[in-house]
């Protein structure tokens, strides 16, 4: 007879630290989402460069979100995570508000995933497991965003296992270079954004949005300004949702039988980005890149009464030069969001 005791299992310090960090991120999503929040919507977003015919660079991301719009109750208020940013909101009241809670995983790989030891100047392998809380305060002509992200980058993110499983599923090349990935590191980011509905056509079928956003943290720090044009039906209800796409947790979504097609461009400057700069406090792989960027996106959103689907194509650096060939696949990817009313 064989008797097994968990007390006999010996975990290395690195494994214990990784399990602790991963558990912290997951528990943040489970327990720090207020129990009394009225969850009205849920969404699943999948990012993958397969949508644009590649499987290099930004390989894939999975994001699951809960939304509290309190459509049948009191307007939701900003929560613990974004309280440090509350001072930046206007004192005037808001017509509506949304709290979103997201847990997600993003996977970054170099151009050739079949090499076990990629060149030092190639995009590093990295994975991110994170929790995000975003608060949207919405008026008739503008909406504000407060965002906070906490995550773990490195082996404890579980990215290696996820990519191997997904590539087996779609019969893609095995990723062989995960032993070179970035080290475990707890990362954070705060973000503050605003979108203005600056023009609406006479019939309400077209509108024009202007946006700006700033972020600060060890995950990344950047400033960004952009514009978007949309054509569709019932645009007023959904004009604030493009603020969710900045954190890659969702696409712009249509609401309550609305639909729209959209296209947009933005320009900005990246001060730091862990996926390309490498670990903050330890030596790791990294690459050089231009910190200025211009990005473009286009997509289509359609909703039934309680279901919404959005497909978007993204290029986050359309002005990349020849020295940034290794970033080409990282910056081009497709995104699919499926949302439904709870």
Image (tube, rainbow, N blue to C red):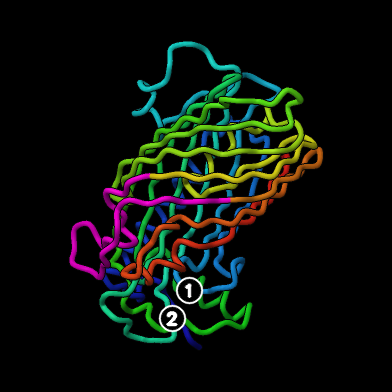
Task: Mark yes or no: residue 259 visible.
Answer: yes
Q: Nearer the viewer, residue 125 or 229?
A: 229
Looking at the rendering, which quadrant does residue 40 occupy?
Answer: top right
Q: Residue at x 76, y 42 (%)?
A: 303
Q: Nearer the viewer, residue 142 or 268?
A: 268
Residue of label 1 = 56
Residue of label 2 = 113
Q: Residue at x 38, y 47 (%)?
A: 150
Q: Which mark is residue 296?
A: none
Count neighbours of disc 2 (C-alpha within 10 A) and say few if under 14, some if 14 to 19, many if 20 or more.
some
Q: Nearer the viewer, residue 44 or 113?
A: 113
Give x and y (percent) for residue 207. Answer: 64, 31
In the rendered image, residue 284 lying in the magenta stretch gets the answer yes
What's drawn in magenta, residue-wise? Answer: 268-297
Give x and y (percent) for residue 30. Answer: 51, 46
Q: Residue at x 28, y 49 (%)?
A: 218
Count neighbours of disc 1 (C-alpha within 10 A) and say few if under 14, some if 14 to 19, many if 20 or more.
many
Give x and y (percent) for residue 307. Answer: 76, 44
Residue 175 vertical placement versus 323 (above, below) = below
Task: Mark yes or no: residue 158 visible.
Answer: no
Q: Do residues under tags 2 and 1 come within 8 Å of each other at their CB atoms?
A: yes
Q: Element at badge 1?
A: loop
């Amino acid at each position: 007879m064989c008797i097994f005791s968990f007390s006999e299992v010996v975990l290395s310090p690195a494994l214990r630290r990784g399990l602790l960090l991963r558990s912290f991120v997951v528990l943040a999503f489970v327990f720090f989402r207020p129990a009394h929040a009225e969850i009205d919507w849920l969404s699943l977003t999948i990012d993958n460069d397969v949508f644009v015919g590649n499987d290099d660079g930004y390989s894939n991301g999975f994001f699951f979100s809960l939304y509290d719009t309190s459509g049948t109750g009191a307007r939701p208020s900003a929560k613990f995570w974004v309280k440090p940013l509350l001072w930046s909101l206007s004192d005037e009241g808001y017509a509506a508000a949304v709290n979103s809670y997201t847990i997600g995983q993003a996977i970054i790989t170099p151009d050739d995933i079949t090499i076990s030891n990629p060149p030092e100047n190639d995009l590093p392998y990295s994975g991110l497991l994170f929790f995000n809380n975003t608060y949207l305060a919405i008026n008739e002509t503008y909406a504000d965003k407060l965002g906070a992200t906490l995550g773990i980058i490195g082996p404890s993110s579980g990215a290696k296992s996820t990519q191997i499983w997904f590539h087996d599923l779609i019969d893609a090349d095995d990723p062989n270079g995960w032993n070179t990935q970035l080290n475990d590191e707890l990362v954070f980011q705060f973000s503050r954004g605003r979108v203005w509905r600056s023009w609406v056509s006479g019939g309400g079928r077209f509108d024009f949005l202007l946006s700006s956003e700033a972020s600060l943290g060890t995950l990344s720090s950047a400033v960004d300004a952009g514009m978007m044009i949309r054509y569709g039906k019932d645009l007023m209800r959904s004009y604030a949702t493009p603020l969710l796409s900045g954190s890659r947790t969702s696409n712009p979504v249509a609401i309550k039988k609305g639909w729209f097609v959209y296209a947009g461009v933005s320009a900005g400057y990246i001060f730091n980005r862990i996926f390309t700069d490498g670990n903050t406090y330890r030596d790791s792989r990294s690459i050089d890149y231009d910190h200025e960027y211009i990005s473009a996106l286009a997509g289509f959103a359609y909703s039934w009464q309680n279901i919404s689907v959005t497909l978007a194509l993204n290029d986050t650096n359309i002005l990349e030069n020849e020295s940034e060939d290794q970033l080409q696949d990282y910056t081009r990817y497709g995104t699919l969001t499926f949302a439904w009313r709870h």
